[in-house]
Image (cartoon, rainbow, N blue to C red):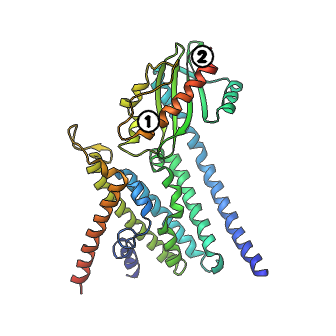
Amino acid sequence: MRETLKLGIILFIFTVVSAGVLAMSNNATKGKIAELEMAGSLGALQEIFGEDAKFQPLDEGKQNEIIEANPSVVEIFVALDGDSASGYAIKNVSKGFGGDLVLMTGFNLDGTVSGMRVLEHSETPGLGARSEEPEFTNRFIGKSVSEEITVEALSGATSTTNGVLAGVNAAREIFNSQLSN
Amino acid sequence: MKLFKIFKNGIIQDNPIFVQLIGMCSTLAVTTSVSNGLAMGLAVVVVLMGSNLVISLLRNSTPEKIRIPAFVIVIATFVTIVEMFMKAYAQPIYQSLGIFLPLIVVNCIIFARAEAFAFKNGPVASLIDGLGMGLGYTLALVTLSTVREIFGAGSFFGISLFGESFQPAGILVMPPGAFIVLGILIGIFNVARRKKATSQI
C-alpha cells in the first residue's frame, strides 16, 4: 500500500511539472497563433472580394446564434461597400481526406458565390493539396446559391473534393436561411 | 571517441528505419514530399534529444515500475511543445504534417531509445544517441521522399522539375508506392552497409 502511494505521488509530480511547462509554452505561443489565424482569414477575404473591400465580423448576437445551430461554423464576416453590406463570407470546417478542412466561402448579395479559399488542410501533396490552387477554387466563382453547388472534381482527390463541397454547401445553406434577407 | 561511435550508430549500423525497421508508420505516410519528410525528421530529432536527455537525467529518480507512464509523460510534453511552436512559427509545415505531428508521441523510435538507452546511460551519451537516431531517421525520410516526390509528382521541394508534358508515376505518392520504394531502399542500404563492414575486417 505504501509503495503504491509513493509511486502515485511520483507520477503526480511528473504530471504537475509537465503541465506547468506546457502552460508556459502555451502562453508563449498563443498570441502568435491567434495573429496568424486572423491574418489568414483577412488574406482570404481580400482575395475573394478584392483588395479594396472592407470587412467586419457579423454582429455578435447573430453570429453566436448561427454557430450554436451550426457548430461547424467558425466565423462570419460582412463585406462592406461604404456603410452597407455587399456580401458575406462564412468560415467553416468540414472533413477532408487527411483531416479537417477549414474553408472560407464568399457570397454576393445577388445570390452567387464570389469565391472560395481553403485556409487549412492536411491533404496529400500533389493530390488533395491541389484544392488550394486557383484552378480548383475558381470553379466555385459565380455558382448560384439557389441549388446545390457541384464542381468538377480534382482528379485523384475525390474525397477532398467532396469534403470541400460539403463545407461550401453547408455555408450556402446558412447564407440562404440566415443572411440573404 | 565513444560519443562519436554512439552518434554514427544511429545513422548507419542501427538506423531506425533501414536496419531496426521501427517507426515505419509515419515514414510511409509523411514522405509524399521532401519538405514534409524533412520537417517530420527534424521534429523527431528535437523530441528525441529532449526526451532522451530528460529521461536520462531522471533515471535515478524514476522507479522501474512506473517508468513507462513516466516516459509517456515526458515524450508527450515535448511533442506538444514542438506542436505549439510549429503552429506559431511554421504554420504551413504544421498543417501538412497534420495528424502525424501528435503521433510522434507513439513513434516506436522514441520509446525504444528511452527504454534501451536513455534509462541506462548518462545525459550526454543519451543526448548524442537521440541526435544520431533522429538524424538517421531524417536521412531515411529525406531519401524516401526525394524519390517519391521527383518521380511521383515531378517536383523537388515544391519546385516543378520537368514541365507540363511530364507524366509522373502517380502510384509513388500513394501508399503502395511508399512500401515499394522503402523496400528497395532498405535492400540497397543494407547491401552497402554489409559490404563496408566486411571490407573493414
Label 2: element kind: loop
Which residue is at the front of the view, B139 or B128?
A: B139
Q: Which one is in front in this view, the residue at disc 2 or the one at disc 1?
A: 1
In the image, residue A30 sits, relative to residue B64, either above or below, namely above
In the image, residue A112 sits, relative to residue B147, either above or below, namely above
- Rounded to the nearest angstrom, the CA distance separating label 2 from label 1 is 26 Å
The residue tagged 2 is A180
Q: Which quarter of the picture shows residue B129?
A: bottom left
Report the residue at 61% width, 36% height from top. A72
Q: Is residue B152 rendered to the left or right of residue B85?
A: left
Q: Is residue B195 rendered to the left or right of residue A83?
A: left
Q: Earlier in the sequence, mark 2 or mark 1?
A: 1
Give, as a three-letter code, the residue at label 1.
Thr
In the image, residue A38 lies at what x, y percent?
56, 34
| Residue B63 appearing in the image | no
Query: Which residue ends up furthest to the front in the rendered image?
Result: A147
